[in-house]
């Protein structure tokens, strides 16, 4: 179910404060400013699609900043894609500036400072996903931010229409379809990044890239299997364990690390549910292939800087602030 936050019912004198809070809660901690001497209105509508958050922002002119101070206070680890659908905007990150007009998009990363500037009324669809889900080396993620990507640029010509259609139909997707679609979207975006950075996907490289995508889909389908391992994955794809390990090493990852990361993402999602539908920590750990609650707790703290129960408490506070106790954090 979509979550809609709008200034329409808020008194004009309180709208900027409300909007700042709405943007903060939807994405990550951000500073939002707008001209105080002008009337302001804005709305953000959010849908979940597996690990993917899709938010449509429709607002008057504003400036959005994520500073080092806010990053230090909240080290959220996401990659975002801003698809301009109306008006214009500029994404600034890593000393690069990406001007956007309708049909163009840009990547930006919550782990480093960025600025979004919208000089007039605009609409942007923002796709937010865990950085790890893209399966790309850190060096590639740093090179793609703050770059304008338009429909005249290779695969990007297919991406914008696909993302727009996905936004319109996300609410109708069944949960099992949503999970698969989210994985397909992240795979497509990682391919776009690879193409934009000038890699040669011809011949053997293309075959290896396709094989890697199949393997990652296989892993997602078997995450709840406690026996999932490099050996079982390699056997299922008729390759050696060494070949499998090389595929992941080329992406700056390991097979075991990828499996653990994906399992932790699913555990965090389940533990962020409302209290009425939330399973026990031990049950979540067992369902997603962790053999002991103690091992799961250590891995969760290492990945997210807090224990599973601390994450649940944070989810409860976030739900209370949003006024929607049934919505996940």
Image (cartoon, rainbow, N blue to C red):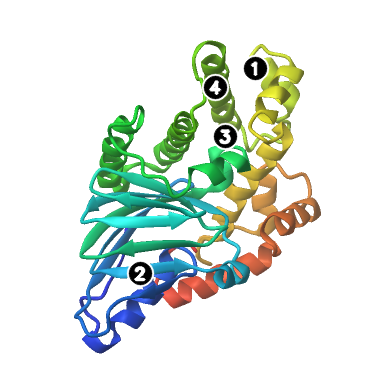
Q: Which residue is mark 3?
A: 220
Label 2 – label 3 distance at C-alpha = 38 Å
Give the camera-side residue of 186 and 285: 186
The residue sitting at 58% across, 30% down in the picture is 216
* Helix, strand or loop at mark 2: strand
Which mark lies nearer to you, 4 or 2?
2
Asked if disc 1 and disc 3 are in contact, CB closer than 8 Å, the reply is no
Q: Which mark is residue 236?
A: 1
Mark 3 crowdedness (10 Å alpha carbons): few <14, some 14-19, many ≥20: some
The residue sitting at 39% across, 73% down in the picture is 32
Q: Which mark is residue 209?
A: 4
The residue sitting at 66% across, 59% down in the picture is 304
In-image side of 45 versus 297 (left or right):
left
Q: Which residue is mark 2?
A: 63
Q: Earlier in the sequence, mark 4 or mark 3?
A: 4
Q: Earlier in the sequence, mark 1 or mark 3?
A: 3
* Helix, strand or loop at mark 4: helix
Q: Earlier in the sequence, mark 2 or mark 3?
A: 2
Label 1 – label 3 distance at C-alpha = 14 Å
Q: Earlier in the sequence, mark 4 or mark 1?
A: 4
In-image side of 329 versus 40 (left or right):
right
Residue that protrudes farthest toward the bottom in the picture: 13
Q: Earlier in the sequence, mark 1 or mark 2?
A: 2
Q: Is residue 325 shown to the viewer in this render? A: no
């Amino acid at each position: 179910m979509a979550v809609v936050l709008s200034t329409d019912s808020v008194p004009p004198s309180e709208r900027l404060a409300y909007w700042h809070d709405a943007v903060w809660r939807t994405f990550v901690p951000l500073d939002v400013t707008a001209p105080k001497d002008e009337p302001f209105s804005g709305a953000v509508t959010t849908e979940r699609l597996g690990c993917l958050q899709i938010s449509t922002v429709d607002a008057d002119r504003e400036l959005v900043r994520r500073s080092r101070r806010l990053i230090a206070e909240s080290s959220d680890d996401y990659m975002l894609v801003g698809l301009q659908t109306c008006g214009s905007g500029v994404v600034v990150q890593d000393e690069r500036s990406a001007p956007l007009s309708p049909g163009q998009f840009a990547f930006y990363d919550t782990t480093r400072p960025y600025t979004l500037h919208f000089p007039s009324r605009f609409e942007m669809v923002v796709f937010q996903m865990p950085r790890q889900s893209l399966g790309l080396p850190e060096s590639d993620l740093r090179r793609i931010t703050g770059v304008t990507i338009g429909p005249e640029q290779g695969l990007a010509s297919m991406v914008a229409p696909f993302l727009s259609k996905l936004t319109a139909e996300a609410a109708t997707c069944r949960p099992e379809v949503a999970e698969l679609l989210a994985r397909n979207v992240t795979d497509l975006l990682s391919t776009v990044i690879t193409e934009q950075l000038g890699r040669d996907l011809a011949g053997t490289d293309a075959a290896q890239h396709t094989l890697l995508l199949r393997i990652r889909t296989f892993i997602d389908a078997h995450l709840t299997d406690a026996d999932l391992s490099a050996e079982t994955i390699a056997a299922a794809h008729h390759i050696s364990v060494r070949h499998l390990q090389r595929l992941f090493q080329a992406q700056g990852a390991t097979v075991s690390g990828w499996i653990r990361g994906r399992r932790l993402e699913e555990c965090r999602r389940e533990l962020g549910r409302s209290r009425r539908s939330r399973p026990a920590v031990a049950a979540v750990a067992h369902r997603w292939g962790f053999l002991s609650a103690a091992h799961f707790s250590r891995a969760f703290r290492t990945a997210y800087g807090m224990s599973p129960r601390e994450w649940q408490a944070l989810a409860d506070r976030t739900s209370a602030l949003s006024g929607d106790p049934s919505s996940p954090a």
